[in-house]
Amino acid sequence: MSLKIVNVMWSGGSPFMSIHKVHRDVLAHAPVGTQVDNWLLLDGELCAGAGQPRTWQLSARVLKGRRFSALLRLWVRRRLYRALQDAAPELVLMDGLGVARLLLPVLRRLPGVRAAVLFHGSTRIAPGDVKLFGRFSPERLSVAAVSATLARSLAEDLGRPVATLRVALDPFAYAQQLLSAQQARQALALPSQAQGPVFGAVGRLVESKGFEMLLEAFAQAAVQAPGMQLAVLGDGPLRAGLEARAKALGIEASVHFCGHREDLASLYPAFDWLLVPSRAEGLGLVLQEAVLAKVPVICSDLPVFREQLAQAGCYLPVGDRAAWAQAIARCAAVEPGSQAATQWRALAPVEAWGAFAAGSLKLLGG
């Protein structure tokens, strides 16, 4: 049984790469012969997936309902209604609450079209959202979240079932793209003969990722264990400030800001350890990527991380600079291989990939 699916995401470009990858992997499990049209409400490029997306070039101000946008939103919904009539999908897959707020009123006028909303992170559910979702039966509107932690929270807020679709990666396909440690370090222009361990930190350079605290902790640890290196992969509005902070801390020679990398998935072997100091996460896919590359992870003590690594995780208090500094210094004298193997077993990649495949097919109605 094939399907016609319209996959609607907020925007394109590197800040939305992880969302695009998740939607691509979900849609890869649709029945054979399924046709997918990708729509981006704002602009940018499709980071993962096939074909040229339709970019609507809409204004975030209009979509978020600021100022004089009510009439504009009505006009936008009319355009979307006509476009969906022309596309004639059987299913519309939506990226999170913002897309759902715009499109669910449109889909009420298209009773023959099923809908699915996939949440990637925590969000504030307003009373109007509960009412909006409540206008659709569970048979017509499926709601899923990328972690059990997030699913439980959303189910309580929305007052309706929310399925857990814990994102997983195909461990066999993932392993085939990995570079060797030497190749990865060369690609990132890291010192080939580091005197200490090479730590990695991956993600958007935004407040919620906790990178400023990480720099301070790394500087403190470097006093006890000189020779360590830190590679920060990602870009964002805080980059200039973080670079300045590294210089002020006197660690600019040991901290390498590598920017956004399209080949990120192949580069994890460059690290001896991955540091994930996030203050909040919907899932934290970088944790899985590192473990699949046999790189052990030290992460914030967040429920979504415990959900994935259970007792095998190395968890630290969120934002506790002293605790992070101590842990980083200890790693200078610890062989990472044993911890990497323990975390691999806890993640159970083969079983997780199978569960993700089954959950994706169920979400799509296959």
Image (cartoon, helix red, strand yellow):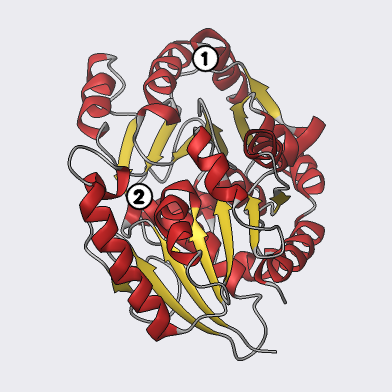
For the residues carrying marks 2 and 1, which lies nearer the camera in this image? 2
Q: Earlier along the polypeptide chain: callout 2 or callout 1? A: 2
The one nearer the camera, 333 or 106, is 106
Whether residue 134 is visible, yes or no, is: yes
Q: Say which residue appears at 65% left-offset and 88% top-offset.
A: 32
x and y percentages locating residue 331 in the rendered image:
61, 25
| Label 1 Cα crowd, 10 Å radius (few <14 / some 14-19 / many 20+) | many
- Circles 2 and 1 in contact, beta carbons < 8 Å: no
Residue 148, picture quadrant? top right
Which quarter of the rendered picture does the C terminus lie within? bottom right
Q: Is residue 28 above or below residue 286?
A: below
Residue 255, picture quadrant? top left
Dot label at residue 255: none
Q: Secondary structure at mark 2?
A: helix
The one nearer the camera, 339 or 61, is 61
| Label 2 Cα crowd, 10 Å radius (few <14 / some 14-19 / many 20+) | some
The one nearer the camera, 45 or 88, is 88
Q: Amino acid at mark 1?
A: Ala
Q: Is residue 116 above or below residue 310?
A: below
Q: Secondary structure at mark 1?
A: helix
Describe residue 197's horizontal placement relative to residue 241 as left or right. right
The one nearer the camera, 242 or 182, is 242
Q: Is residue 61 above or below residue 7?
A: above
x and y percentages locating residue 248 in the rendered image:
23, 15
Q: Say which residue appears at 30% left-offset and 39% top-offset.
A: 257
Q: Say which residue appears at 74% left-offset and 68% top-offset.
A: 362
x and y percentages locating residue 161 in the rendered image:
73, 47
Describe residue 365's horizontal placement relative to residue 28 as left or right. right
Q: Amino acid at mark 2?
A: Pro
Residue 234, picture quadrant? top left
The residue singled out by tag 2 in the image is 15
Dot label at residue 325: 1
